[in-house]
Amino acid sequence: MTSSQAAPPRRIGRVFDPGLAFRDDRLQRACAHWQAAAHVSPSGLPDRASFGLETLHALGALSRAMLIDVVDGGARFRFRLIGTALTAIAERDATGRFLDELYPPEVYTKFKASLDWVMRERRPVRAVDTFEFSGKEFIGYEALVAPLAAGGADVAVVLVVAIDFAPPR
């Protein structure tokens, strides 16, 4: 292969890590904040208010955060907030849109699996993969996916903080 013929990017393959072995320090800080807030919460879940804009900014995660509303107990999910860095990668602002309307079924199924898992287990997970939309498969990410309450004991919102990187070739 000549230098003018670059190899296509190699897919990472989905990593689903309940052990939370984050490599990015912003994700480590966000996860530690989630754990501390969960520890003092009577329900064992941090409240959505624990991850307000100021907190996400202080954690270095605001531009890479998504808050996803759980609709009808998890039958559907809707973007409440999408950080500017993620909006730039996607080349669209999907705030207020339902995930199942935005993504093809194979992409939505993988995304929903993480959301379903944190709702069921009521704890965070680490996910690593590539963005699979709009021809962005060459951009890898590591993400914290974590459940949040909203004034009660049920999971009402899912926090996702996704840090992009160039996947190995």
Image (cartoon, grey):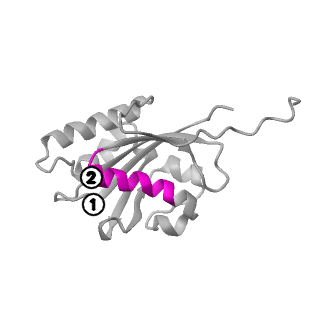
- What amino acid is at disc 1? Ala
- What amino acid is at disc 2? Leu
Query: Which percent across, then down, holds residue 139?
Result: 61, 42
Query: Which percent across, then down, holds residue 37?
Result: 20, 41
Residue lying farthest to the left in this orientation: 42
Query: Which percent across, then down, holds residue 13?
Result: 57, 41
Give the structural element (helix, strand or loop) at label 2: strand
| Mark 2 Cα-neighbour bin, 10 Å: few <14, some 14–19, many ≥20 | many
The residue that appears at 16% across and 59% down in the rendered structure is: 152
Q: Which residue is mark 2?
A: 148
**As drawn, is 95 to the left or to the right of 151?**
right
The residue that appears at 36% across and 51% down in the rendered structure is: 117
Give the structural element (helix, strand or loop) at label 1: loop
The magenta segment: 109-123
What secondary structure characterizes most of the magenta part? Answer: helix
**Which disc, if any, is residue 23?**
none
Q: How far apart are labels 1 and 2 at the CA level?
A: 6 Å
Tell me whether circle 1 and circle 2 mark residues in contact (CB < 8 Å): yes
Query: Which percent across, then down, holds residue 111?
Result: 47, 54
Q: Which residue is mark 1?
A: 156
Residue situated in front as seen by the camera: 6 or 93: 6
The residue that appears at 37% across and 56% down in the rendered structure is: 116
Q: Is residue 113 magenta?
A: yes
